[in-house]
Amino acid sequence: MKKEICIEDIKIKKDDHTTIFYRDQGFQIIGNSTIGCGIDHVKSIVHHSLKNREAPLPYNEGEVSREEINNEKKEYLKAIFEYKGIEEPAAAILIPAESTQFGVVTTSNVTALVNSHNGQRLFMSILVLVDSDLNKKTLLKLFKATIDAKNAALWDMGVINHFSFDPLDLEDNESILIASKGSIDEVTSNESYILIKNVQTAVRKAIKESLSNCGFPKDVLAYMNDVGIGVDDLVDAGMEMVVGVEKTQEIRDKLKKQIYHSLDDLNVVSFIIAGIRLEEDYEKHRVHGVDVDDDPAYLYSDEVFGMSVANQIAGTKAIFNFKRYDEAKPGIISKLGPVLDDVFAGLIAGCMSKVFEV
């Protein structure tokens, strides 16, 4: 990794759980890391994963105060410093992941290193190294540029939507850290402009590289999971409406297989993704003058979606089957919003029509 870093005299120590960046002259930093917040000068920058610790936070949310949690993390990091012989002062980031694997992108005199972990919440740490001496004003600009690039990358990768990611609901130890070689009194406007562009480019690319290792962009099954819909849920709902024949395991297996087959159809996927996005816009009231919280009778475009999905899978007969599922709303269908209940009723109706196709 050393050859990928823009600062030539940087030194790196790495093992399974810890990566240490250091220079003889140290770094000028700005950030919100677990240790080393604000603007400061440090000798080392440390990324440490929690995988080797049996109980990094041996309590549930709300059992202790946030201050106690932060102090506990800092005490833990201080022990890591002593154990690994890390020279202080140091900035440190805790990573709730198996290892400190980075997405690394270098553009000109900027290197962005991003570690992402997609657990119960999406965690991301961003370290930006700048091969220049900077003043505080420029550091602040680069910090903002990093946040802007992060949000752009999240949009690029389809991460930002209220079903799977809320920028205000982050891991407590998620961090952004900008590190320059040292301090200087003035940075010209042109130098500042070029640095901002380089930071934005490097951070955006590094985040996308890192997120790709966490399963992004997501497939349609992951989008369905975001809204609480699994294939087994759809199978259960479909089986509730089986009449006139015995509800056998064979029918369940055929239905499940057909659902997976239908989810390979680009047109079916298009309706599902469009429905998810439209449902979100309705729920967030993003369109002025549009309120469908009560699923008004005059809203019928959602049924057009549902009939279109059913028709795409099994033709005209599936449209009539769709009406049964739309009216009865079996299983998971009854728990969905005004658009998605019809979209997935159409999916089940189409698949069931194929299962019993003569």
Image (spheres, helix red, strand yellow):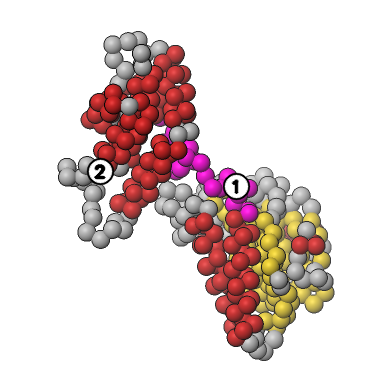
In magenta segment, residue 303: no
**Res 303 → quadrant:** top left
What amino acid does circle 2 point to? Ser
Provide the residue designation for mark 2.
Answer: 301
Provide the residue designation for mark 1.
Answer: 214
On the question of residue 174 being in view, the answer is: yes
Observer-nearest of 141 and 47: 141
> Label 1 crowding class (10 Å Cα cut-off): few <14, some 14-19, many 20+?
some
> If the image is split into quadrants, where does the N terminus sit?
bottom right
Gap in angstroms between the C-alphas marked 2 and 1: 35 Å
| Residue 60 percent coordinates (x, y) | 52, 48
What amino acid does circle 1 point to? Cys
Residue at 38 percent across and 49 percent down: it is 277
| Residue 44 percent coordinates (x, y) | 75, 68
> If the image is split into quadrants, where does the C terminus sit?
top left
Residue at 59 percent across and 83 percent down: it is 137
Proximity of marks 2 and 1: CB atoms separated by less than 8 Å: no
Q: Which residues are magenta?
A: 209-233
